[in-house]
Amino acid sequence: MKKLYAEVIVDISHEKLDRPFTYALPEELREAAVPGSAVTIPFGNGGRLIRGYIVGFSDSCGLDDARVKSVVSLDTGDETSESKLISLAAWMSRNYGSTMIQALKTVVPVRKKYGEVTVTTISLTDRCRADEYAALCRQKGWKARLRAVEELMRYGELPVVQLRSAANVDGGVIRKLEEDGVAEISSVSELRRVVKEAETFPAPVLTEMQRRAVDLILEEWEGRNRPVLINGVTGSGKTAVYIELASRVIGSGQQAIVLIPEIALTRQTVLRFVRRFGEKVSFMHSRLSGGERYDQMKAARRGEVSVMVGPRSALFAPFPHLGLIVIDEEHEETYHSENSPRYHARETAVRRAELEGAHVVMGSATPSVISAYRAEQGEYLGVTLAERYGGSILPEAEIVDMRAELMSGNRSVISRKLSDRIGETLLSGNQVMLFLNRRGYTGSITCRSCGNVIKCPHCDISLTKHRNGRLVCHYCGHEQPDAAVCPACGSPHIGGITVGTEQVEEFLRSAFPGAGILRMDADTTKGKEGHAGILTEFGARRADILVGTQMIVKGHDFPGVTLVGVLLADLSLSDSDYRSAERTYSLIAQAVGRAGRGEKKGTALIQTYQPEHYAVTAGAGQDYRAFYEEEMKFRSLMSYPPAGHMAAIFGFSRDEALLSKGMGYIRRYIDRIDPEGKLMAIGPAPDAVGRIRDCYRQVIYIRHRDRDMLVLAKDYIEEYVSVNSGFENIRIQFDFNV
């Protein structure tokens, strides 16, 4: 029989061994071996037996057979969380077009080992002995030792650091207590816990509507176990449903992952789960320290926590008994990775659940068109929450035509009607949220004489002016002084032509001098607790107006907000992307939904230059069905996802001419592998931003009714690139259903 070889990762936590090693796979193990299987292998010159994980197979080997060692055993029945994740990485590598190593680094994100945190404690050896020792201290005048032993007599055991502080003693006194046999010192290691001791509360009482939703989902779990899509209006209480489902899973000894789209939502979501499950909850996000992230993964692997909350990367928490994956606000683009492998958390969660026998539940007030289509086709179970929790009603929304404002002489970003409503809301003691899909002070700096736009010298993108007078690139961080004259023609007629959050804040401070105003955007939330600090201030009603970018309209619940203003609501309609209407509808509907979530009725004003567009009118009315039907007509006509499938082939190089040549070759190769022209190809062309950090970017789009055909094309192109040396200085990435 022909030989078969297994590619084995031998230690996924050690960077120096972050590559596969080739082993012969004995005939008797072939049938049971799959990517992700745990195996025992001889390793190193001494041939010591260690554990490894199969990441792929080959029927040939570039080494002398005499030098190739064999897999000793297949550890069936001893599947670990790592082996399941490696199997997931193999699927991601195949379906999203990346190397296995790139996929492994994604699913096992915390690779560096961090030292343990050690807590040293001191405790009394004997109470009677302590009484005698205290008396001796008084007799001898040992005041420091007396303070220390009395403090220990009060508590019995204390951390050494706390005792030194409370008794005002040094390490010498502590050691003397141990030498005299009064106390003993011990050290224990503990994890860096991001959720400390927490009080738990009974499960929230579900409404009849929420209870029906839970019953439908539990019934599905007993049968087909399809992914579940909850389409719930803003404020309908989707989180309460998630918590009830997580409770069922945890009660059976399993764990749950809860994905959220933004770091800004971590605090609020974690708090809700902590109130129910206490210290069983942990969370992950990019602003934790390396040691904190490492320990959260270690706690998950040990099964010491039952719920992991976090953005996209939390999907790979190494739970040994995963039972549920929740994807909140499933429509959000942040679930789509921009780094290779360019995976989508939605599809990857479904695949992980299939591998581990877990459930997937997604929720949104504005579901992605792809998910809504799959629910309509029966691939997902669709569940609807049509009413707000607690009986509050949806806000009234009004569309303000900014063209009329401009014609009447108002050139401000805030209409007269919105300005009046803000004043009325503040007088009534309520709060206001203003959403603007921009940051910075002004947008591009443009010369009125020659039309030149000041761009970043390293990226093909215009610089943005901030209030400190600096021009900033929001891609690479480049900064330079503001320009007094046009660098191209010397004209003094140069300046910004759009508006940013800083300018809105400045206008509000001038128009409403007595109001407390907070601004929340990428520039004000750079610190570790930047999001939490602003949200806490606004939630405690220590501010009247919150102005911000997209992060303020996603899932936040502030009962005091009765007015929401959406500024430049149609800005995203100008994006060069077939999903621009979907993004616009989602942003408007989500923003409108922030109003009136308490006892008082809410109002939303939507300012737009395209008041007739179906994304704007449907978003104002939170009428998802109306939007979906119009959008699907467009998608079906153009064979865009979900009516068809689409992939992007991205090329990156610092040599623009070489990149153009290489992408041209790929385009011609596509025609060769598809002589019948069933693959629709467009490009190559510069990406939306054609240069970032001096690296040029081009893209080719391919479309087909069958996704498998796109994956096959990806396989052919990967092989073509790998055997042609001309691509050594060109990096190629693939993105599906972009």
Image (cartoon, grey):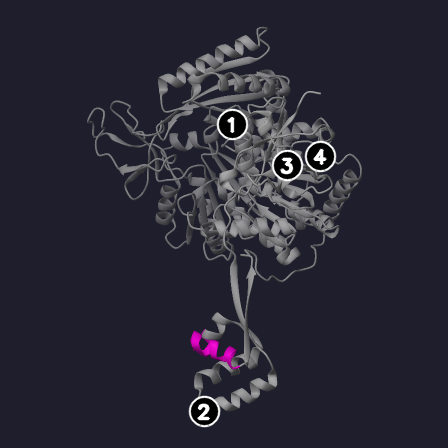
Residue at 71 percent of width and 20 percent of height: 1
Q: In the rendered structure, which amino acid carries the disc numbered 3?
A: Ala
SS type, badge 1: helix
SS type, badge 4: strand
Give the number of the mark in front: 3 or 4: 3
Compared across the picture, whether 198 is left or right of 684 comes to right
The image shows residue 567 at horizontal and vertical percentages of 45, 37
Our reading of the magenta stretch's main secondary structure is helix
Magenta region: 165-180
Dot 3 corresponds to which residue?
Answer: 349
Compared across the picture, whether 304 is left or right of 526 comes to right
Q: Earlier in the sequence, mark 4 or mark 2?
A: 2
Dot 4 corresponds to which residue?
Answer: 382
Q: In the rendered structure, which amino acid carries the disc numbered 2?
A: Lys
Residue at 35 percent of width and 38 percent of height: 477
Measured in 3D between alpha carbons, the distance from the residue under mark 4 to the one under mark 2, in whole angstroms, is 79 Å
Q: Crowdedness of circle 2 by 10 Å Cα count: few (<14), some, many (20+)?
A: few
Q: Earlier in the sequence, mark 2 or mark 1?
A: 2
Give the number of the mark in front: 2 or 3: 2
